[in-house]
Image (tube, grey):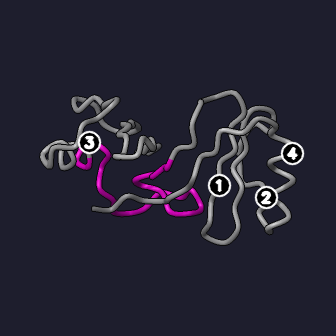
């Protein structure tokens, strides 16, 4: 199963304070609007900071992207990942429309209540 780039998406209360904190660890801005969300990167490590956008931290996989948000030449489509997980008995909270192609996403929740977002942008 090729899941693409991995990041942790953190629900933060104060975007500026959280950004400043992670910059002390060597993270630099990689994307975002700077007002409600920012993506930070340190080497291959990626953290998304999201203020007021969701309630819980989320594990995020991006099929089709490398750690620089560049399209991979070969990857497993989000719909194929979804079908595989469903066939293994994994319950999905939201599902990608399997009649479409291109960008799509689905969400599962692990046994401890942690949301896992599989979010394909290509």
What is the distance, in whole Å, between disc 2 and disc 4 at their CAs? Answer: 9 Å
To which residue does mark 3 refer? 79
| Label at residue 22 | 2
Q: Please tell me how crowded label 1 is: few (under 14), some (14-19), or many (20+) other residues with Cα within 10 Å.
A: many
Instruction: Give the mark toward the camera: 3 or 2.
Output: 2
Relative side of 97 to 117, left or right = left
Check whether the beta carbons of the residues at disc 3 and disc 2 lie within 8 A of each other. Answer: no
Q: Look at the image and tell me whether residue 119 can be seen.
A: no
What is the distance, in whole Å, between disc 1 and disc 4 at their CAs? Answer: 14 Å
Which residue shows up at 65% across the image and 54% down it? 47
Q: Quadrant of the N terminus?
A: bottom left
Which mark sits nearer the N-terminus, 1 or 4?
4
How far across and how far down the image is residue 2, in percent? 33, 62
- Residue span colored magenta: 59-81
How far across and how far down the image is residue 77, in percent? 30, 49
What is the distance, in whole Å, between disc 1 and disc 3 at their CAs? Answer: 25 Å
SS assignment for the magenta stretch, majority: loop
What is the distance, in whole Å, between disc 4 and disc 3 at their CAs? Answer: 37 Å
Which mark sits nearer the N-terminus, 4 or 3?
4
Secondary element at image label 1? strand
To which residue does mark 1 refer? 47
């Amino acid at each position: 199963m090729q899941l693409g780039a991995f990041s942790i998406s953190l629900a933060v209360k104060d975007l500026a304070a959280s950004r400043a904190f992670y910059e002390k660890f060597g993270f630099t801005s990689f994307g975002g609007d700077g007002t409600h969300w920012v993506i930070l990167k340190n080497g291959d490590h990626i953290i998304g900071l999201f203020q007021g956008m969701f309630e819980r931290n989320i594990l995020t996989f991006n099929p089709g992207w490398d750690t620089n948000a560049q399209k991979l030449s070969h990857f497993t489509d989000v719909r194929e990942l979804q079908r595989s997980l469903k066939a293994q008995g994994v319950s999905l909270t939201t599902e990608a429309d399997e009649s479409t192609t291109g960008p799509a996403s689905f969400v599962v929740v692990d046994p401890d209540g942690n949301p896992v977002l599989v979010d394909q942008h290509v």
